[in-house]
Image (cartoon, grey):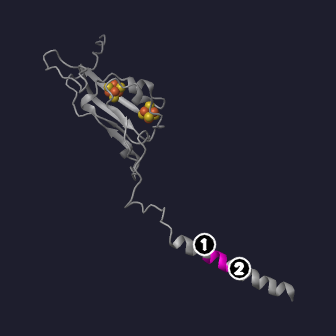
Amino acid sequence: MLNYFRDIGLGIVTVLKSMGVAWRHLFTPSVTLQYPTQKWTMPERSRSKLFNKIEDCIGCGQCARVCPTNCITIQTEKRGKEEPEIFASDGTAIKLRTYVYDIDMTLCCYCALCTFGCPTHCLFMTGEYEYAVYDKVCHIYPFATEKQMISKTPKQQPAEKA
Ligand code: SF4
Ligand code: SF4
């Protein structure tokens, strides 16, 4: 009998305690972010989607060489002597035409090594973290805007002997 009333008392105390917690939280400011209408501002040095400001890219290939996962593909050609000189915004002369500059973000491990060595600081990580897609091909980002000018002719095959 004693246990019976002790359990009832315990139940009442438990309910009162839980109601107390609920009431306390009713009047404290919410910490829940209403995503996606509200979003966190990413920290300044956060690592997320890469971006290449291609007009400042000199096509040196440093980024592709240091990339441990080979996710950067670059193809360049020398700009012709007759073409007007162009410069990156830091004054570096752009002597190569970068006609392919693709980053495959599905392979990227977000190490940021490619950004550290970039001489013109045109390659950097943005704060963008929402870039989910249905087809992973869409994660290959082409940045090059120029076209290949010097067409590479296939090597001449030696003529067959009669
Ligand atoms: S962050 Fe790392 S893995 Fe990604 S492209 Fe740059 S070097 Fe490659
Ligand atoms: S290191 Fe910078 S300048 Fe050189 S190819 Fe890469 S993005 Fe362009």
Looking at the image, the residue that sits furthest to the bottom is 1
> Residue 39 versus residue 159: which sits nearer the camera?
39
Among the two numbered marks 1 and 2 on one chain, the one whose residue lies closer to the N terminus: 2
Q: Quadrant of the C terminus?
A: top left
How far apart are labels 1 and 2 at the CA level?
A: 12 Å
Residue 40 on the magenta segment:
no
* Residue 11, horizontal then vertical, whole percent: 72, 81
Q: Secondary structure at mark 1?
A: helix
In the rendered image, residue 62, in percent from the top left (x then y), is placed at 38, 23
Front-most of 111 and 140? 111
Answer yes or no: do the residues labelled 1 and 2 have beta carbons within 8 Å? no
Instruction: Assess whether residue 17 is covered by the magenta stretch.
Output: yes
Instruction: Give the dominant element type of the magenta stretch: helix, strand or loop.
Output: helix
Q: Where does the magenta region start and end?
A: 15-19
Question: Quick one: 109 or 42, which is closer to the camera?
Answer: 42
Left or right relative to 64: residue 85: left
Q: Is residue 96 visible?
A: yes
**Residue at position x 66%, y 79% from top?**
16
Amino acid on which disc 1 is placed: Val
Does residue 70 appear anywhere in the picture?
Answer: no
Does ligand 1 reach within 8 Å of label 2's beta carbon? no
Q: Which labelled disc corresponds to residue 21?
A: 1
Answer with left or right where residue 95 lies relative to residue 27: left
Q: Quadrant of the N terminus?
A: bottom right
Q: Nearer the viewer, residue 44 or 57?
A: 44
Residue for badge 2: 13
Tell me the amino acid under the disc marked 2: Val
Residue located at (44% from left, 60% from top): 33
In the displayed structure, 105 sits above or below 120; it is: below
Q: Look at the picture and state if 105 lies above or below 14.
A: above
Q: Is residue 14 left or right of residue 142?
A: right
**Residue 48 image label:** none
